[in-house]
Image (cartoon, rainbow, N blue to C red):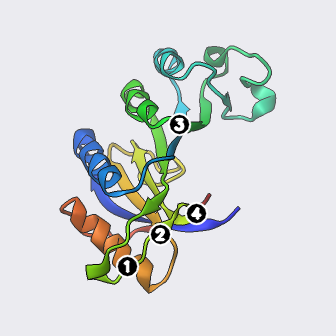
Amino acid sequence: MSNSDAAAVLTTPVLTEALRAVRTLLAVADIRGAEVDLEAIIHSPEVVGRVKEVLPGLQWWAVGGKEKGSSEAGDDPVACLPIKVFDWCRPLDRAEPFIAALADSAAAVRWDLDAWPEVPEAGLDAVSQKFAHLTLSVNSRDLFQDEPSQDHTVYVHTRGGAAHTARVAWLAACIGSTPTGRVESSSL
């Protein structure tokens, strides 16, 4: 396992604006073999029902720990609320239905990309899959749903260093934004 630097390039209270930014960045990236990882903390039976429709075979466990309930044990998620959802390696087309099912639940949706492109005019080499990720934190100010909020933040992941700073600025400019200055370490 390794870490990447996740730099916030947009924070907005408008989910559609955050999704527009994500779609723009996905259009820039190489996504031929990309997957999406979905995480959330769910408090509501209604949201559990909607998320289970989007993600059959949902993987989850009680916020209090697996011993308090889990999909592994065959427990009823509604009886174990609040629950943490960790559903990884899904096709890209699952991301937006998952986000739509969340209501006000805090979540992180991470796209594992094949690469960020080479940008010769900016002096940037292509960035391989290991460091090419995009995360949308929904109803949360951080990558891990520790800071619930009514905002949504778009993060781009790259490897650290000067090239990271230039890549983040270039990606932010692609969505008409500038880096917010917030950088978090993310284990991949």
Q: Looking at the picture, which amino acid does disc 4 mark?
A: Lys
Which residue is identified by label 1?
Answer: 124
Mark 2 Cα shell of 10 Å, populated few (<14), some (14-19), many (≥20): many
Mark 3 Cα shell of 10 Å, populated few (<14), some (14-19), many (≥20): many
Residue 179 in sight from this viewpoint: no
Q: CA distance from mark 1 to mark 4?
A: 16 Å
Residue at image x 67%, y 21%? 80
Which residue is identified by label 3?
Answer: 40
Q: CA distance from mark 1 to mark 2?
A: 8 Å
Mark 4 Cα shell of 10 Å, populated few (<14), some (14-19), many (≥20): some
Which residue is identified by label 2?
Answer: 127
- Number of numbered discs on residues: 4
**Residue 130: assigned label:** 4
> Given this view, does label 3 or label 2 mark the residue nearer the observer?
2
Q: CA distance from mark 3 to mark 4?
A: 23 Å
- For marks 3 and 1, the one nearer the N-term is 3
Callout 1 touching callout 2 (CB < 8 Å): yes
Residue at image x 47%, y 50%? 147
Q: Looking at the picture, which amino acid does disc 1 mark?
A: Leu
